[in-house]
Image (cartoon, rainbow, N blue to C red):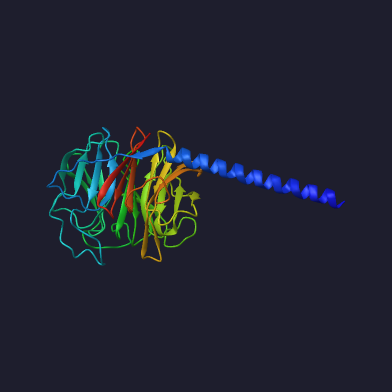
Amino acid sequence: MEFKQNSILFFLVALLILGCKNSEKNKTEQESKNSDSYVLVNDWPKLPDNFTLGSPTGLGLDSKGNIIVFHRSGRTWETMPISHLPVIEENTISKINSKTGEILNSWGNNLFIMPHGLEVDNQNNIWVTDCGLHQVFKFDSSGNLLMKLGEAKISGNDSEHFNLPTDVAVTADGSFYVSDGYGNSRVIKFSKDGTYLFEWGKFGNKQGEFNIPHGIDLDNEGNVYVADRENNRIQKFDAKGNFIAVWQNKITEQLYSVTIDNKNNHLFGIDYMTVNDTIVKGSDIFRFDLEANLQMQFGRTGFYDGPISRYHDIQIDNNGSIYVGDILGNRIQKFKLK
């Protein structure tokens, strides 16, 4: 009887050891697969000596694959309130050739106080949010103003005001969503001509609530994805604002931005981690499928041996290359598929 029990015990221990080895092997293979997926493109972009790239808070892609960046030049966000600050005298919006890294043009001087989010729609119009002005702007690709929402330097929570708006997402028909933002913890939908339609959200951590809705994007079905920054999660809603799902991972912190790769049905997100709000750990890039399964992750957690970063926005081009705006290093980085 004792021999039989010992044999069973030995068999179970052997299975456990084998299972651990297989698990470790699978983990190693997965990490190896992930680590071989992307590589940093060095010496990109190529900025002229007289060009000052401030915190690149918003990124977009036009129809030709050029990167549009919204940055703060020499401006820093250190204290509140920020509406009393003067407008930035230098250019704040630049178009960069995604292949060569060369700057094609720059504009946006004497327009903004605190640049934040940027979106390029299917007509190559450029949408931006300014937290200092509490406003949302729409420009054509040449920088001509087409629309302005909100009252300059006046915050509010009604249908005609914003409170530190963070980002914009534009639908195929021209209607658009604004994540609003640091002050109001809501998402608002407007018609193509800027008419208020409806809103949802309030401060909190339950479904449909937000603690800084910081980034926003849409998939081909019209679903809305919101980077709920301080709740460390991405929430998914239908076009009417009805809650569908929440995506959260124990290894993410402060989810800053979300973008949908509609070509490959991938969801990308970026986070930022500190310890006790003092020790900077940096950012990670995440890729999920649209069923919320984590496919890859890199940055502070491995296989990118570079300076600590604080990624603020992310974009994916048609070739699968990743672009991130780093507001800690005041730079834009490009990662391409191997």
Q: Is residue 9 left or right of residue 196?
A: right
Q: Residue at x 40, y 33 (%)?
A: 263
Residue furthest toward the right? 1
Where is 227 relative to 205, above or below? above
Report x, y in % for residue 161: 28, 59
Report x, y in % for residue 284: 39, 50
Q: Nearer the viewer, residue 43 or 167?
A: 43
Q: Is residue 125 left or right of residue 335?
A: left
The answer to whether residue 253 is seen in the rendering is yes
Q: Nearer the viewer, residue 19 or 79?
A: 19
Where is 283 relative to 275, above or below? above
Snapshot quadrant of residue 162: bottom left
Q: Is residue 231 left or right of residue 165?
A: right
Q: Nearer the viewer, residue 186 or 323?
A: 323
Q: How many marks?
A: 0
Report x, y in % for residue 331: 25, 48
Snapshot quadrant of residue 48: top left
Report x, y in % for residue 153: 22, 62
Residue furthest toward the front? 3
Snapshot quadrant of residue 151: bottom left
The answer to whether residue 239 is seen in the rendering is no
Q: Quadrant of the C terminus?
A: top left
Where is 271 relative to 146, above or below? below
Q: Nearer the viewer, residue 56 or 332?
A: 332
